Image (cartoon, helix red, strand yellow):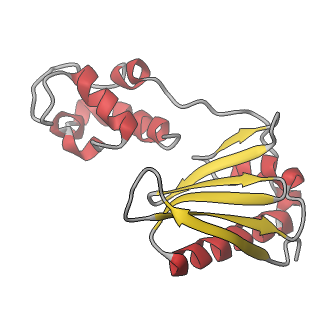
Amino acid sequence: MYLNNIKLLFIQPCVAESKKIRFKAEFSSDVSNIMPYLNSVVKSGSYNSNMPSFTFKKDSRLINIYANDMTVAKAINETDAYSIMDFVKDLINETYDNKNSIEPNYEMRKKPSAFKIYSYLPKKNCKKCGETTCIAFASKLLTGVKTLNQCDVLEEEQYKEKLKSLNDLLELV
């Protein structure tokens, strides 16, 4: 076992969502050398080798892993905080155990722009999604206000490949 435990340091109200919490926890070991492997395992994550840090979302929670600690925003409550800590500990240990079969990824993934997302949309401005234009819909996809299934046109056979590409792009959001 690479990471023996994670110790909760503090809990505070979440700035982004007042009914949720944010917290910080400390690792029993430095995990910076595992981050490039996590970057390969968690496709929706973002690795920053300069810091080093690894950031990803689990459901609505934003998890930031640093060399010796982690921060989490939008946790539901203290019980959820401990559950997330267990999840991260298992993720790190499992990744470490399998690192010989994982190609480390040192690339820093970038969040796609609204224009990049728009390039894959049907561009019909049909308003079925509730937005006046497809570029407005693309912007709402980036912020998580809208989801791809709200664009009925994307379900048409001719947009099947674009829908797959959009799903891949939005994994980074």
Residue 67 image offset from top left, x and y in percent:
84, 53
> Where is 79 relative to 76, above or below?
below
Q: Residue furthest bottom?
A: 79
**In which quarter of the view is residue 140 placed?**
top left
Observer-nearest of 81 and 131: 81
Please report the residue visible at 77 percent of the width from the left and 41 percent of the height from the top: 105
Q: Nearer the viewer, residue 83 or 13?
A: 13
Residue 71 left/right relative to 128: right
Position in image of residue 63 (x %, y %): 61, 56
- Please indicate, yes or no, whether residue 103 appears anywhere in the rendered image: no
Give the residue displayed 65% in from the left and 57% down from the top: 71
Q: To which quarter of the image does residue 48 belong?
A: top right
> Residue visible at 39% across and 26% down?
117
Q: Which quadrant does the N terminus fall into?
A: bottom right
In the foreground, 75 or 136: 75
In this rendering, is residue 93 above or below 127?
Answer: below
Horizontal and vertical percent position of residue 162? 36, 30
Q: Is residue 60 found left or right of 155 in the rendered image? A: right
* 26 shown above or below 135: below
Q: Is residue 57 left or right of residue 122?
A: right
Q: Residue at x 39, y 23 (%)?
A: 114
Do we see residue 98 in this rendering? yes
**Count of picture labels:** 0
Q: Give the answer, above or below, for where 124 lies relative to 127.
A: above
Q: Could you tell whether 1 is left or right of 121 in the image?
A: right
